[in-house]
Image: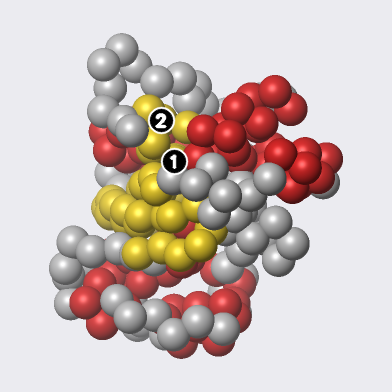
């Protein structure tokens, strides 16, 4: 998604413990994990490079759903979410390589799932797509189409809220700005109703 704007991106997979702490709230958890990812040393990064990390969770009735470990857990998650409404929360953490403390932002979106069938769930799980997705689904999947509708940020439900990323990057002096909203809407073929409010600093989406 970052490459949509023509940015050169190098991927890194920091090894961190993503276990949930005792009595840890969803917002605290997802922000902590994003900060942990951003804080890891990236050997190939140059001093003025941006380190951009994100973490996404699904929250249903206060329960945090991460990525399914196996077929059984994927089936359990999709069954739990079927024909119900839940929250998708993505935390961002952004820093420059030479700095230690990242700037952070949080995006939360409400997703209303459709009443998909058991057969549809099984077919989707057999595709292998759920296993690297929080809540065991991708909202943009063209075949499974798990969601009826949503309120918030489409890109965030996919894993990276680009307008929230832009307003975080603007906290750095010398940053020239990127038209993430334009690229996002072009690629997703979606007219976002909240982008201007996000960029104005509202706690929305």
The image shows residue 159, relative to residue 6, as above or below, that is above
The image shows residue 197, relative to residue 134, as above or below, that is below
Q: Mark 1 points at which residue?
A: 58
The answer to whether 138 appears left or right of 98 in the picture is right
Q: In which quarter of the image is the C terminus?
A: bottom left
Q: Residue placed farthest to the top in the image?
A: 22
Is residue 199 among the parts visible in the rendering?
A: no
Is residue 117 among the parts visible in the rendering?
A: yes
Kind of element beneath mark 1 = strand
* Mark 2 surroundings: few (<14), some (14-19) or many (≥20) residues within 10 A: many
Q: Which colour scheme is used?
A: secondary structure
Towards the viewer: 143 or 186: 143
Towards the viewer: 6 or 122: 122
Towards the viewer: 16 or 43: 16
Q: Which mark is residue 64?
A: 2
The image shows residue 106, relative to residue 77, as above or below, that is below
Residue 1: x, y in percent?
A: 58, 68
Quadrant assignment, res 52? bottom left
Q: Do the residues labelled 1 and 2 touch (CB within 8 Å)?
A: yes
Residue 28: x, y in percent?
A: 26, 33
Residue 152: x, y in percent?
A: 34, 64
**What residue is at 31 percent from the left and 12 percent from the top?**
22
The answer to whether 140 appears left or right of 94 in the picture is right
């Amino acid at each position: 998604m970052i490459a949509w704007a023509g940015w050169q991106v190098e991927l890194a997979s920091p090894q961190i413990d993503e276990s949930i702490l005792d009595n840890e709230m969803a917002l605290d958890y997802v922000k902590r994990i994003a900060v942990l990812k951003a804080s890891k040393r990236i050997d190939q990064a140059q001093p003025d490079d941006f380190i951009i990390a994100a973490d996404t969770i699904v929250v249903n009735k206060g329960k945090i759903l991460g990525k399914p470990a196996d077929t059984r857990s994927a089936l359990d998650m999709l069954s739990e979410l079927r024909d119900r409404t839940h929250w998708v929360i993505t935390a961002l953490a952004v820093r420059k390589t030479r700095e230690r403390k990242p700037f952070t932002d949080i995006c939360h979106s409400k997703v209303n799932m459709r009443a998909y069938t058991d057969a549809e769930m099984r077919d989707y799980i057999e595709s292998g797509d759920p296993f690297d997705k929080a809540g065991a689904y991708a909202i943009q999947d063209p075949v499974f189409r798990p969601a009826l509708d949503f309120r918030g940020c489409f890109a965030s439900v996919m894993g990276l809220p680009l307008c929230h990323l832009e307003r975080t990057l603007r906290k750095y002096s010398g940053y020239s700005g990127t038209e993430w909203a334009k690229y996002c809407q072009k690629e997703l073929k979606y007219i976002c109703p909240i982008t201007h409010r996000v960029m104005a600093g509202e706690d929305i989406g």
